[in-house]
Image (cartoon, rainbow, N blue to C red):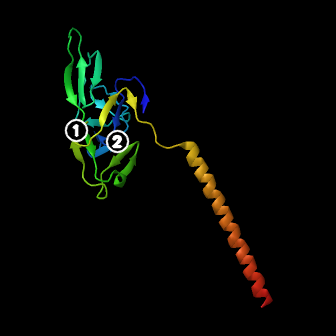
Amino acid sequence: MQQTSNELDVAVEGHGFFQVLRSNGNMAYTRAGAFKINNEGIITTASGEHLEPEIAIPAEALNIAVAPDGTVSVTLPGETEAEEVGTIQLARFTNPDGMRALGHNLFEATGASGEAVVGVPGEEGFGQLSQGFLEMSNVNLVEEMVQMIIGQRAYEISSRIITTADQMLQSVTRVA
């Protein structure tokens, strides 16, 4: 996780996906928590999908707070206490690896992933939310490059073995 200090950046620490409603009306799931507020005051993903359940932020809000349990609160001018405006829920799957990638960090449920189980962050096996953080890639680029070079070398060696065996077989066939 990388700290960003942006009040609309939210990371999931543990199991769970944010639910978003796509423009075609289908539900999608993401772990990308770099949220924005659209011109209607609705919290959306960077590409404009609405967070589900929908949360509206008043235009006059001075700051936004997201609690580890998903409670979203805002402080309004002239108010001393924060006002709750919604709750972020998470979805989890029996087999998250079975989800279908849609692109733009979005996934959809499939028969292999199982149905989404929706719940409150921090309860019943769901991860907690961390405001001001983003989840970074878990891919180590250097390690992946090394593995690719090793694979390429293994292919070259196998190719040479086959070529040599073929040449030896041709020599045996000519003699016979």
Q: Position of residue 138 (x, y in %)?
A: 46, 42
Give the number of the mark in front: 1 or 2: 1
* Residue 102 location (% of width, % of height): 38, 48
124 or 171: nearer the eye? Answer: 124
Q: Secondary structure at mark 2?
A: strand
Using residue 96 as the reference point, say whether residue 147 is left or right of it.
right
Q: Is residue 164 above or below residue 4?
A: below
Regarding mark 1 in the picture, which secondary structure is present there? loop
Which of disc 2 and disc 1 is earlier in sequence?
2
Q: Kindly identify which residue carries mark 1.
A: 123
Give the total number of marks visible in the rendering: 2
In the picture, residue 130 is in which quadrant? top left
Image quarter of the C terminus: bottom right
**Quarter of image, res 2:** top left
The quarter of the picture where the N terminus appears is top left
Residue pushed farthest bottom?
176
Q: Position of residue 11 (x, y in %)?
A: 36, 33
Is 142 in front, or is 99? 142
Residue at image position (30%, 42%) is 16
Question: Mark 2 = which residue?
Answer: 30
Q: Is residue 61 visible?
A: yes
The relative height of residue 87 versus residue 23 in the rendered view (above or below) is above
